[in-house]
Every structure is written in structure tokens, then in C-alpha cells.
Image (tube, grey):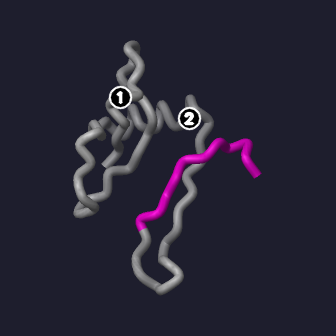
Amino acid sequence: MPATVESTADSDEGIGILRIDFPHGGRNDTLSTISWDNFFNKFEESNLAFLHEDKTAGGELSRFCKFIDREQE
């Protein structure tokens, strides 16, 4: 689910640092669920790209992901 870190939310939009809250991944109480529309608006506004890993080195399902600046190489 799309989420934001509550403590980083600005007062205008209420959207801070973006996160993905995975089902069955252990609930993080510092996250607040947001709509996909709000998520993608903030994603585009922040010029982000999504970096992820499908499987670990051992072949297991990986939930590793992070948002990076699109200008990074």
C-alpha cells in the first residue's frame, strides 16, 4: 500500500517521505496510508525513480526497494 512517514509530513499537503507498506511485512506504526493518486503526485513532484530487487541472492522473494532521484546514475 502507498504510505508516508507521518513525522516527515509537511503541514500543507500532509505527505512526507514516501514508502511502500507491504502486506504481511510487519506493520510500521510510523507510516500513514495515502491514496495512489497522492503517492504518484508526490513521486512525480519529487522527481523519483523506484529501485527494487525481485529476489535475494538466495533466490527468495525480496522486498528491498527504495526511491532514488531520477538524476542519479
What is the distance, in whole Å, between disc 1 and disc 2 at their CAs?
Answer: 21 Å
Image depth: mark 1 or mark 2 in front? 1
Between residue 62 and residue 48, name the one nearer to us: 62
Q: What number of labels is visible?
A: 2
Tell me the kind of residue under disc 2. Glu
Give the residue displayed 23% in from the left and 63% down from the top: 24
The residue carrying mark 2 is: 44
Furthest-top residue in this view: 12
Q: Is residue 62 left or right of 31 when viewed as pictured? A: right
Q: Residue 27 location, x and y as percent?
A: 23, 52
Going from N to C along the chain, the mark reached first, 1 or 2, is 1
Q: Is residue 29 above or below residue 42?
A: below
Q: Which residues are magenta?
A: 63-73
Numbered circle sitting on residue 53: none
Q: Residue 21 location, x and y as percent?
A: 32, 51
Give the residue displayed 35% in from the left and 22% down from the top: 14
Q: Residue 4 location, x and y as percent?
A: 37, 37
Tell me the kind of residue under disc 1. Ser
Secondary structure of the residue carrying tag 1 is helix
Furthest-bottom residue in this view: 58
The residue carrying mark 1 is: 7
